[in-house]
Amino acid sequence: MDPVGAVSASTVLHIALSGAREWQMVHDTIPVKPHTSTITGNQPIFPPNLTLVNSDASWFQESSAAGFGWVLEESQRGILIEGSTHSDFVSSPFVAEALALREAMVAVQHSPNVRMRSDNLKFIKTINSKSFPMELYGVLKDIKYLSLSFDFIFFSHVQRSCNVLAEKRSPLCHPTLY
């Protein structure tokens, strides 16, 4: 005997799937600027007024806390800007790297041309493949959307030894556990 106003499990499932499909259709129709944004794995010709952005994350399995650090270097003006933040309830080091890069993109939105670098090769390969694994789906959609605000953007790997400044900016700086 169902209580008055109760909804069956199949109805709930149908509503959830319909909502998920609708959400997917809306988010897959984000307009792309023609020929102005570059998200690629191939080495492009970099514009002269390029801002170089290194990001890094630290993650702690015991507490699921993560720290994010980034360093922005504007080649034309020689300006170096450092930033950091942290978050609780981060599910993995992979997600932490994605969140760090997203935070760095927000910090560099004033620059039209950027080269985003991370020392996590797996993450860079994922972002350049344009495949969105479920674990990173929301963050990668944010990164894709933020990419539209740049005239030029390129995601690349940087050796860990060349990413020390970004790593030290992370407020929870410890070797990343992966």
Image (cartoon, grey):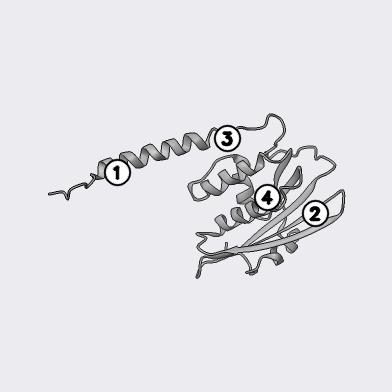
Residue at x 77% of width, y 59% of height: 81
Sequence-wise first label, 2 or 4: 2
**Residue denoted by label 2:** 73
Sequence-wise first label, 1 or 2: 1
Q: Give me the disc on residue 30.
A: 3
Disc 2 residue crowd, few under 14, some 14–19, many 20+, Cα 10 Å: some
* Of the pair 14 and 62, the residue shown nearer to us: 14
Specify the amino acid type for callout 4. Answer: Met
Q: Are marks 4 and 3 in contact (CB under 8 Å)?
A: no
Sequence-wise first label, 3 or 1: 1
Disc 4 element: helix
Specify the amino acid type for callout 1. Answer: Val
Residue 85 vertical position relative to residue 50 in the rendered view, above or below: below
Q: Give me the disc on residue 105.
A: 4
**Residue denoted by label 1:** 12
Sequence-wise first label, 4 or 1: 1
Q: Are marks 3 and 1 in contact (CB under 8 Å)?
A: no
Given the current orientation, which residue lies at the most extreme top position? 34
Disc 4 residue crowd, few under 14, some 14–19, many 20+, Cα 10 Å: many
* Of the pair 67 and 4, the residue shown nearer to us: 4
Residue at x 76% of width, y 59% of height: 162
Disc 1 residue crowd, few under 14, some 14–19, many 20+, Cα 10 Å: few
Sequence-wise first label, 2 or 3: 3
Is 48 on the left-hand or right-hand side of 3? right
* Of the pair 59 and 16, the residue shown nearer to us: 16
Q: Are marks 2 and 3 in contact (CB under 8 Å)?
A: no
Q: Position of residue 23 (x, y in %)?
A: 46, 39
